[in-house]
């Protein structure tokens, strides 16, 4: 365990001032085990870990000294309230800067719009400078120290962060951990033969090791980028998990860890509150495995978390880990003993279960899958979402499917057919993505509105079908807002933006149909949000209503526990949340084309002896003859007095 020596204490007091130095040294003492122990386990046989830690602590001190005064004040507030991101008023919005407003300065012109929607957490999709041309939607970063010049500069990012902080809005930005673009300075210097840079990447002289690894690896993009290695003339076979222009970093080299930590420090000091750690499961490779979720990947994230907390305790880390629930909770520290890791992680399973239930009108799979998983450790929280920039992968386990009376493979095929609009009677208008010709697996692209049936209803001119589609969209967002976690609204969902019919006209995107659900923001549509009766007004009002209702509900604070309550009605999903200072909360959701009812005895089971209506599709509690009624595709939120 690292302990501050006289030189470290003297440097802290000279450079930070007495009060802030004492705080830094107190954090160092508190975090010393979380820094030293994971690094010893990863690098103990590779380097002098004591010297490595001493250097990393010095880097953290440099970052703390460089931290702007307004961010230091934010740090102090968040040290007092370390679960600041769990508040029920935290409501997120996710967008690409260019597609939302053209540029970072453009976003500053639309902050009133976000405030009107109730947003307190803004996630800007990848905006660090990518390689020119094809760049995996911005995830092939050529320069971590610069913003994509098409959207602005680092100075613009700092000004936006300052404006957001004045409004009480936290800023989240992506940091790609697993790989860089082949145009990145490290890659260019490796190709030029500079000492030390070749070891920043995973490079092999021939196919011997790559062939051994690939026996158990799974292709991420089997139809467009098969294989996990690329031959680079003059260098060798480079590990490229995602695309040939994205080179995987070699985290077995401590210099890579230190360089990436420095990147985190620099970005946080620009005003970023949350770093989304992209592709975190891929950080460590081991022969005979799928190359994901290795113990060392978790140890590296633990060390990142401890060292960033030392320098800037107001920064939160969010894991981008689309893995099974049992593996996902580990990224929140849910190991055999609690080891602090990320503060936030995406609740991918909730998202998948919502879409599955929307298609089947049957909640039994969701009841089983969502009730058996482990909750996040208390200091951490889920991020709940309905859609994101990515495709939907049907991570329904065969075991969960069988327990719900389904065949897992057949159910996943059904979901693909249903949301691609191929299943008879489907209302969805999506498309399959990433089809694997060997396994037959695929994922789904499409905006939430199009997958919910708004496209097809408008095309048919069917007012009843349109109401049902809008209710589907509101209902699944109601679940995301109330199931436990920070709810995220993906850009345009609040206006029911449909699939972009022109997505393939851009040659850079024509091979990737995920761009169909990444349409540019339609500000003319946004202007209609105040016109009663328009689709935009109906959906915007619905989502803003969810935000307003959620803000005052302590049980909807992120973290904590959600308990699923089975009902006798296979179309109604029921769950409760509790907070020690509040009456319990009960949500009832009807995933059916027709009205449904359930026995009012569920109120006693939920601990609601004097139920109070909070929010619902109908605007009131329907209670008759001992049963609670729910409209088609409707929900009700209840709490006690």
Image (cartoon, rainbow, N blue to C red):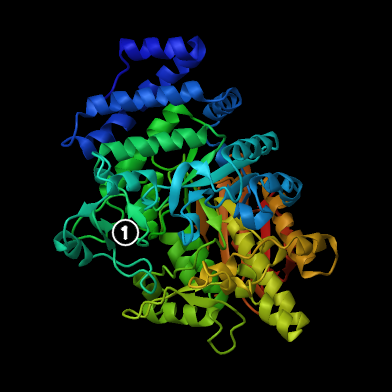
Indicate the quadrant where residue 581 lies. top right
Q: Residues within 10 Å of mark 1 (few under 14, many from 20)?
A: many
Residue at image mark 1: 240
Q: Nearer the viewer, residue 23 or 354?
A: 23
What x and y, as percent, mark residue 303?
Answer: 34, 36
Q: Residue at x 56, y 83 (%)?
A: 421
> Residue at coordinates 38% horizontally, 73% vertically from top-left?
403
Residue 579 figure quarter = top right
- Note whether residue 306 is visible: yes
Q: Residue at x 40, y 82 (%)?
A: 410
- Nearest the viewer among 134 and 591 is 134
**Res 552 seen here:** no
> Looking at the picture, how far across and down is residue 37, in whole percent?
26, 33
**161 above or below 529?**
above
Q: Quadrant of the N terminus?
A: top left
From the viewer's perspective, tell me whether residue 343 is left or right of residue 254.
right
| Residue sitting farthest toward the bottom | 424
Estimate the x, y position of residue 614 in percent, counting from the top left: 72, 54
Q: Nearer the viewer, residue 71 or 372?
A: 71
Vertical arrangement, residue 276 with respect to residue 360, above or below: above
Instruction: Return the x and y of residue 472 as percentages of the image width and height.
Output: 65, 71
């Amino acid at each position: 365990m690292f302990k501050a020596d006289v030189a470290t204490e003297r440097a802290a007091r000279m450079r930070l001032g007495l009060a802030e130095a004492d705080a830094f040294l107190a954090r160092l003492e508190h975090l010393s085990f979380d820094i030293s122990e994971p690094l010893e386990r990863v690098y103990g046989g590779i380097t002098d870990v004591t010297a490595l830690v001493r250097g990393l602590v010095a880097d953290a001190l440099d970052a703390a000294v460089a931290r702007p005064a307004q961010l230091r004040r934010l740090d102090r507030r968040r040290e007092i309230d370390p679960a600041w991101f769990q508040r029920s008023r935290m409501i997120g919005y996710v967008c690409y800067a260019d597609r939302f407003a053209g540029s970072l300065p453009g976003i500053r012109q639309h902050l009133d719009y976000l405030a009107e929607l109730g947003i307190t957490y803004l996630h800007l999709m990848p905006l660090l400078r990518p390689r020119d041309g094809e760049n995996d939607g911005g995830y092939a970063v050529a320069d971590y120290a610069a913003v994509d010049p098409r959207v602005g500069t680092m100075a613009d990012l700092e000004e936006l962060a300052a404006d957001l902080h004045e409004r009480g809005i936290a800023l989240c930005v992506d940091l790609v951990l697993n790989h860089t673009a082949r145009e990145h300075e490290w890659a260019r210097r490796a190709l030029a033969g500079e000492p030390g840079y070749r070891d920043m990447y995973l490079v092999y002289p021939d196919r011997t090791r790559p062939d051994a690894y690939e026996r158990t690896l799974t292709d991420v993009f089997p139809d467009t980028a098969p294989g996990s290695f690329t031959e680079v003339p003059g260098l060798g076979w480079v590990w490229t998990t995602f695309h040939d222009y994205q080179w995987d970093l070699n985290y077995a080299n401590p210099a890579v860890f230190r360089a990436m930590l420095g990147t985190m420090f620099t970005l946080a000091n620009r005003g970023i509150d949350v770093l989304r750690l992209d592709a975190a499961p891929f950080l460590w490779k081991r022969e005979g495995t799928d190359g994901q979720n290795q113990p060392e990947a978790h140890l590296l994230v633990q060390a990142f978390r401890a060292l960033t907390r030392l320098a800037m305790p107001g920064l939160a880390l969010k894991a981008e880990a689309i893995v099974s629930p049992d593996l996902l909770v580990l990224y929140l520290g849910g190991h055999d003993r609690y080891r602090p890791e990320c503060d936030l992680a995406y609740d991918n399973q909730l998202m998948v279960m919502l879409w599955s239930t929307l298609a089947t009108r049957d909640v039994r799979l969701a009841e089983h899958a969502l009730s058996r998983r482990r909750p996040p450790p208390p200091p951490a929280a889920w991020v709940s979402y309905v859609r994101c920039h990515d495709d939907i992968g049907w991570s329904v386990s065969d075991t969960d499917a069988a327990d719900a009376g389904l065949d897992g493979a057949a159910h996943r095929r059904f979901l693909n057919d249903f949301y691609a609009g191929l299943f008879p009677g489907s209302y969805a208008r999506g498309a399959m993505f990433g089809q694997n010709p060997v396994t037959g697996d695929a994922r789904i692209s499409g905006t939430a509105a199009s997958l919910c049936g708004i496209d097809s209803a408008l095309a048919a001119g069917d007012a009843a079908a349109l109401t049902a589609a809008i209710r589907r969209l509101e209902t699944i967002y109601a679940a995301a807002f109330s199931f436990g976690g920070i709810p995220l609204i993906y850009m345009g969902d609040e206006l029911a933006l449909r699939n972009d019919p022109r997505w393939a006209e851009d040659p850079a995107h024509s091979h990737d149909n995920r761009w169909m659900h990444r349409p540019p923001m339609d500000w003319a549509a946004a202007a209609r949000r105040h016109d009663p009766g328009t689709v935009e007004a109906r959906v915007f009002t619905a989502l803003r209503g969810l935000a307003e209702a959620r803000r005052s509900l302590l049980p909807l604070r992120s973290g904590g526990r959600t308990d699923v309550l089975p009902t006798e009605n296979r179309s109604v999903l029921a769950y409760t949340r509790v907070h020690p200072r509040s009456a319990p909360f009960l949500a009832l959701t009807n995933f059916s084309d027709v009205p449904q009812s359930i026995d009012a005895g569920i109120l006693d089971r939920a601990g609601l002896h004097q139920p109070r209506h909070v929010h619902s599709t109908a605007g009131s509690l329907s209670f008759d003859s001992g049963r609670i009624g729910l409209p088609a595709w409707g929900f009700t939120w209840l709490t006690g007095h």
